[in-house]
Amino acid sequence: MQNRSFQPTWFEQFPWLHYNEQKDSVLCFICAKQNDKGNLRTETKKEYSFITEGFSNWKKALARFKEHESSDCHKTSFDYEVKFPKTCGDVFEMASEQNRKTMQGNRRCLIKIIENLQYFCRQGQAIQGDTDLESNFFQLVKLRSKDDSLLLDWIQKKNNKYLSHDIQNEIVGIMAHQVLRDIVKDVGFNFFSLIADEYTDISNQEQLTLCLRWVDDHLEAHEDFLGFYNIPNIQSNTIVSVIKDALVRLQLSLSYCRGQCYDGASNMLGNRSGVAKHIQECQPKAHPTHCHGHSLSLGVKDATKNCKILSDTMSNTNEVVKLVKFSPKRENLLGEVKSNLEEEDATAAGLTKFSATRWTVRATCFQRVLNNYNALLTLWNECLQSDPKPDPDVRGRIIGCQAQMKSFDFFFGLNLGQRIFSHTDNLSESLQKSSMSAASGQHNAKLTMNALKQIRSDDCFKAFYETVLLKKEPHPDISEPEIPRRRRAPARLEVGSGQPFFPETSDDVYRRIYFEALDLIISAISERFNQPSFVAYKNLESLLINFLNGKDISSEMEFLRINYAEDIGHDYLLPQLEIFKLLMKAKKIDCFADILDAVKSLASNEKNMISEIIIICKLLHVNPATSATGERSFSMARRVKTWLRAKMSQQRFNHVAILNAHKARTDKVRLVDIANEFVSRNENRKRNFGTFTEADLFQTEKIQ
């Protein structure tokens, strides 16, 4: 027996359909709405299966949809919903000339109120103040009323001013929902990936951020913030239920989900009960990706921990920075010291703190310490001499930093760390771009590893070591490189009968450290980026590249047939691959990024000839490399919900965050539609305002 189900493509042919995923049935949105308003009381042939009960006989779906669309009940509802508002004027407005002018003035004032709220939400600024009269919102309305006597009379009224908190929240909510509807409309029936993360806000509430990555028909990737959701805990079951509920409310089906990207927490990527596991149980093709940014950061941490000289350098650099940046007195003193030094040292940028929320500060921090080396050594002497009764703990820390900065190991570690971390910071910065896919991120990681392998040679070490010695010459306080005392390992740790290695020169000592550090960072990146979910993307990418290079693709074709039978037409794929090979003949293709750029440059008629290849490109491009969009939403949330606004309601916080995150979409919101939706919710508002038109946006001081 064939299982039948609702088809999303029906939305295109019958836009009035409303699908209830929980009941697995559809309603006519227009008829249900007008029935609730009481406009179908006179209809004798109501189709309750499309109004209240829900229709689910999918076998006869198309025929019944067409019958309902041509029924008198649906035509009447359509007239009330669409035709009458456009062709008929407002009854109260037509009653008298005075009413018309009053309603016209009211509409102008409400438009200005909506404009003010649009501005505050777009900029993420506080709307409220200590009192209503001192709030930013009221003061802006008051300021604008200086040029508009009608608005001045409006705010001086005793009631019906539409300036209350509830009215503000309602209007902001309408604008936020309009932005979300625009996003969902743009996503349409394209594949998408989920990006989710959680953080604790300023009021100690757990917030889950949900973002969506999708690829349009021009193969451009978009990452859109969908909102914050207050969750009672961060257990995987809770997060999954919130994600599913959000998708249902937005009418986005998990059947189109082809990827997930989370941080490495066990509740998100746990093999047994993580969020990714639960989502894959609903949609096996939603392949999870451990955020490449987090993976790289963990890899660098592993390599630093296992390399003693890098670990010590990282700890000592952090201590140096804290001594300066956490003390205004010492930071000002450092500025004075730099002003008395040579011009080159005086113009060096200040120190940079290690950040817990950024992935690209290590190389910069090391370089800033190197640039300020002379100034820092002078600073420690000034601190020890200028303060007759220093705090013993601070004095000990300063003496410790001074001693470390005079050692060659620390100086060598700074230069080595700056050399290695400049590559990892560059990789991290490239991964954070919203256009970067997981497949392209893997390619960039390989490029970085190859670059690190390239500098792992005796010649490169020799050049690097000579450079370090040259940099050391202006700093006579730094000790000379030394050979450590020969120490034989304990017998219990000895393996085999070979003779232990003891370095003969300082070059040998630091050559071993140089190679060890490079081996550790290369190994860490390789291990962290070797993710199980990348097998699917590797097969998709190999299919295209191997075919272009004339290699066998039988295994990749079989993989597609088993895993992507519903997404890719297998019968048309081979001839389209041959056409694709002709189109790519004059182009150099080495990786998926090259394919993506080449396909984007094709004419539309050529793209139509390789529609299945386009789908493969979308599948490869839809999974994000990092969850940086989610991380950026946290930064935005900290600007919106501050200590002064810690008691903001969850609904208002979410709506303001949506409008602030999507500034371009907020600017394009049609104020007339917002105003009409606001007015349609209340009969008293209809009597006060009537129907808004585009002309209300350009009214002059004098009401005609």
Image (cartoon, helix red, strand yellow):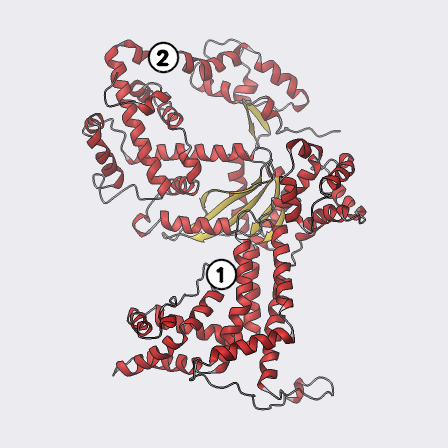
The answer to whether one can see residue 393 in this image is no
User: Of helix, strand and loop, which one carries label 1?
Assistant: loop
Count how many numbered circles sit on residues in the image. Answer: 2
Neighbours of disc 2 within 10 Å: few (<14), some (14-19), many (20+): few
Coordinates of residue 130 in the picture (x, y in percent): 23, 45
Residue at x 44% of width, y 20% of height: 36
Residue at x 53% of width, y 66% of height: 421
Kind of residue at disc 1:
Thr
User: Of helix, strand and loop, which one carries label 2?
Assistant: loop
Neighbours of disc 1 within 10 Å: few (<14), some (14-19), many (20+): many
Coordinates of residue 612 in the picture (x, y in percent): 70, 37
Q: Nearer the viewer, residue 266 or 459?
A: 459
Q: Identify residue for label 2.
A: 89
Residue 643 horizontal side relative to residue 213, left or right = left
Looking at the image, is 81 positioned above or below residue 224?
above
Disc 2 or disc 1, which is closer to the eye?
A: 1
Q: Quadrant of the C terminus?
A: top left
Alpha carbon separation for disc pair 2 and 1: 60 Å
Coordinates of residue 638 in the picture (x, y in percent): 38, 51
Q: Identify residue for label 1.
A: 360
Nearer-N-terminus badge (2/1): 2
Q: Nearer the viewer, residue 65 or 237?
A: 65
User: Which residue is most to the front?
Assistant: 343
- The answer to which quarter of the image holds residue 62 is top right
- The answer to which quarter of the image holds residue 558 is top right
Kind of residue at disc 2:
Gly
Residue at x 52% of width, y 39% of height: 245
